[in-house]
């Protein structure tokens, strides 16, 4: 069976590109030769990143995006395609984090988290998928989370939204089979980004203590955003005819110093 090959030029739209995983992905893909459209609400941050990428020899354009606004989504896609051409790769990674115990969390806050992380990702998918199907190729990547399979206390709304992403992607994959378009989800584990950095100390301590109590904080290592960018890159560069559907990336636990010393002692002269 034949597959339409990836073209030489593959424009990318990254939602949530103003910081964290989105910004790291933009830099990683642009360094590999991909034209990138940077989309988020913070235009000043996007412009700075676009200028940095351009100065480094890449191609980038900044486009305002609020994934909770259908008009903003449509206009963002139109601007990206006008500047770079038809989108070959789209990354849905926009979001923020609001935490609290489920029985204390305001219903409005819960709904906002669902709208940003789940509905927002779907709005972006809906805005670009028709063109991808018409061209018979394309990669749409959703940034999920490992909380979808290992829920964490104090994150009910976020867990519900990211679990919804998993269900959405599983359904989409069935529906897109045979169209030439691939959809996948990257599930990061604990990653050092700006999300959650605005929490007050008391909330953070209470949340972490609950995570420890339930065995959800095995070690203190965090992933860097660049680790997720590398996983995403592997997904979208998979040759046609193969489909990397789900990638979960977790932080590796550090080797204790005594064990490192023992490993050093076991090395032979040739090492």
Image (tube, grey):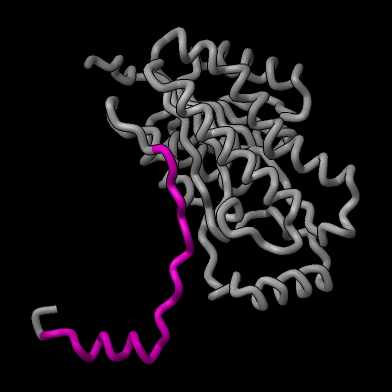
Residue at point 51%, 37% (across, down): 26
Which percent across, then down, holds residue 269?
10, 85
How many numbered discs? 0
Q: Is residue 35 visible?
A: no
**Quarter of the image where one finds residue 108:** top right
Q: Is residue 55 above or below residue 231?
A: above
Q: Is residue 264 magenta?
A: yes
**Camera-side residue of 237 and 250:** 250
- Segment colored magenta: 245-268
**Camera-side residue of 89 and 4:** 4
Left or right of 97 on screen, residue 16: left
Quarter of the figure with the C terminus: bottom left
Q: Is residue 158 magenta?
A: no
Quarter of the figure with the N terminus: top left
Which percent across, then down, holds residue 86?
49, 13
Residue at point 74%, 54% (across, down): 156
Which percent across, then down, holds residue 177?
40, 22
Residue at point 66%, 20% (across, down): 76
Left or right of 21 on screen, residue 182: left
Left or right of 215 on screen, residue 95: right
* Residue furthest left as drawn: 270
Q: Is residue 200 visible?
A: yes
**Camera-side residue of 260 and 246:** 246
**Quarter of the image where one finds residue 265:** bottom left
Residue at point 43%, 47% (across, down): 247
Left or right of 215 on screen, residue 72: right
Which percent across, then down, holds residue 43?
72, 32
């Amino acid at each position: 069976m034949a597959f339409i090959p990836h073209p030489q030029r593959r424009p990318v739209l990254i939602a949530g590109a103003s910081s964290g995983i989105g910004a790291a992905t933009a830099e990683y893909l642009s360094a590999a030769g991909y034209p990138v459209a940077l989309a988020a609400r913070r235009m000043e941050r996007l412009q700075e990143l676009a200028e940095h990428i351009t100065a480094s020899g890449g191609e980038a354009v900044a486009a305002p995006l609020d994934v909770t606004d259908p008009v903003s989504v449509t206009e963002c896609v139109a601007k990206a395609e006008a500047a770079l051409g038809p989108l070959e790769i789209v990354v849905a990674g926009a979001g923020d984090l609001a935490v609290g115990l489920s029985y204390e969390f305001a219903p409005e806050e819960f709904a906002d988290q669902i709208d940003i992380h789940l509905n927002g990702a779907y709005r972006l998918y809906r805005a670009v998928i028709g063109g991808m199907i018409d061209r018979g190729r394309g990669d749409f990547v959703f940034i999920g989370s490992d909380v979808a399979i290992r829920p964490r206390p104090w994150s009910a709304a976020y867990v519900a939204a990211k679990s919804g992403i998993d269900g959405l992607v599983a359904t989409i994959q069935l529906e897109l089979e045979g169209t030439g378009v691939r959809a996948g989800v990257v599930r990061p584990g604990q990653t050092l980004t700006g999300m959650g950095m605005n929490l007050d100390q008391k909330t953070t301590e209470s949340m972490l203590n609950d995570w420890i109590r339930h065995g959800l904080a095995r070690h203190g290592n965090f992933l860097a955003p660049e680790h997720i960018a590398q996983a995403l890159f592997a997904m979208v560069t998979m040759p046609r005819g193969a489909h990397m559907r789900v990638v979960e990336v977790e932080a590796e636990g550090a080797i204790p110093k005594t064990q490192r010393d023992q490993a050093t002692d076991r090395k032979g002269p040739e090492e």
